[in-house]
Image (cartoon, grey):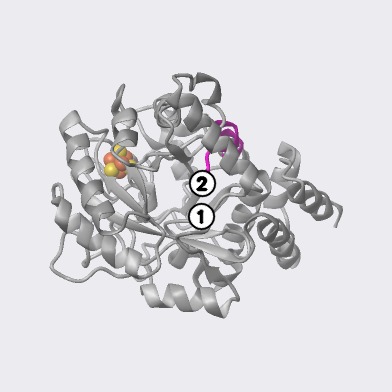
Amino acid sequence: MDLLDTLTAKGLRGEVPTREEALAVLATTDDELLDVVAAAGKVRRRWFGRRVKLNYLVNLKSGLCPEDCSYCSQRLGSKAEILKYTWLKPDQAADAARAGVAGGAKRVCLVASGRGPTDRDIDRVTDTMAAIKDADPEVEICVCLGLLSDNQAERLKAAGADAYNHNLNTSEGTYGTITKTHTYADRVDTVQKAHGAGLSACSGLIAGMGESDEDLVDVVFALRELGSDSVPVNFLIPFEGTPLAKEWNLTPQRCLRILAMVRFVNPDTEVRIAGGREVHLRSMQPLGLHIANSIFLGDYLTSEGQAGQTDLDMIKDAGFEVEGAGEATLPRHRADVAEAAQAGHASGGCGSAASACGSGGGCGPCGGHAHAPSSSAAEAAEAPDDELRSDLVKVRRRGAGTELAPNA
Ligand code: SF4
């Protein structure tokens, strides 16, 4: 297939495909699917070998958010019966983080619901990061607190944060149908603030919200242009009690095509299968590992994942290995870009690098919860059978915020 030969050749050189080629990946047939996975796998192995980076989510503050992100079980007015609690104490968060690191996680992702942090919240997270790094100085910490105000990214960086997550989620053109309380531009601004402060950029998307192929390609190219070092690909978890509860329009095959398209557009960037992995890829999860080089271990913010040991077994059975703490995730040339950005920041000149290292701080999407917007885009994409699938979505009842041990 000429398309796949072209995409493979470009990916092996670290080149980005054209927009038309990216769209063509999404239009491939089921007969072509294994060839698509194999082509994306060659690119994945070129830059990341057979390593799988494990990330571990700690939900520092759950639910009761004033924002209205339609996919989110923590949103304003959500009737999803999720855990709701205010800020974990530093030692509680450190206990949860320790479980994830003991399970093999290299990065801990500290997430809090809300529009954005207050300066007092930055103090809380600073204390939490200190407690985590006291126990394990090598662990990477990514912080995800929503929209940042001036100087907050710099404070997080100075306190030891390695990365900031804020997802773009969907295309600029459809963002207003997903969320009304903030804008796509607000999200881009926070990614740029984080990057400008020298934090590694983690920013991704959510698929399955009723978007078109063009929307998916738009957001993935936007992430590439922002320079995101890691791109979490979330598959909408239609949570009962949220606007998108009936939005079941993904198949395992569709998810694999989306992952492959993201890989071809980001050949040398960490591509992470995030929320919705178990729910939508189901028995096809191991094929996803041939495309993505990173997953979350165990549970999500408000929903449960498969057992942590099952994640580890799956990685081993598929012929992959967990990336160690001492191993670099990004290929050298990409790491050089990140280091140059940080050096630029240290010398006071970070502006020119703002488009080279996007990060994504964004609460919610990583958490594997989902709702549909009450927008026309969501209504147009309503699942044909219009069913709730509560059998596939299990609310998290263990780990952070509970008396039960974390799943790691
Ligand atoms: S994604 Fe974040 S900002 Fe949006 S509703 Fe959920 S917790 Fe609030």
**Label 2: element kind:** strand
Identify the image quadrant of residue 301.
bottom left
> Of 401 and 242, which appears nearest the observer?
401
Residue 372: image x %, image y %?
Answer: 38, 46
Residue that appears at 31% across and 34% down:
158
Residue span colored magenta: 220-230
Dot 2 corresponds to which residue?
230
Residue 44: image x %, image y %?
Answer: 66, 58
Residue that appears at 49% across and 39% down:
170
Q: Is residue 40 visible?
A: yes
Residue 189: image x %, image y %?
Answer: 42, 25
Mark 1 burial class by Cα count in 10 Å: few <14, some 14-19, many 20+: many
Mark 2 burial class by Cα count in 10 Å: few <14, some 14-19, many 20+: many
Q: Is residue 255 left or right of residue 119?
A: right
Identify the image quadrant of residue 19.
top right
> Of 126 and 63, which appears nearest the observer?
126
Q: Is residue 82 visible?
A: no
Q: Which mark is residue 272?
A: 1
Residue 216: image x %, image y %?
Answer: 58, 42
Kind of residue indicated by mark 1: Arg
Q: Is residue 91 left or right of residue 180?
A: left
Q: Are marks 2 and 1 in contact (CB under 8 Å)?
A: yes
Residue that appears at 38% across and 48% down:
365
Kind of residue indicated by mark 2: Ser
Whether residue 61 appears in magenta in the rendering, the answer is no
Q: Is residue 381 left or right of residue 113?
A: right
Tell me if the residue at label 2 has its CB under 8 Å from ligand 1.
Answer: no
Q: Using the numbered discs, state the Cα–Cα distance from disc 2 to disc 1 in whole angstroms.
A: 7 Å
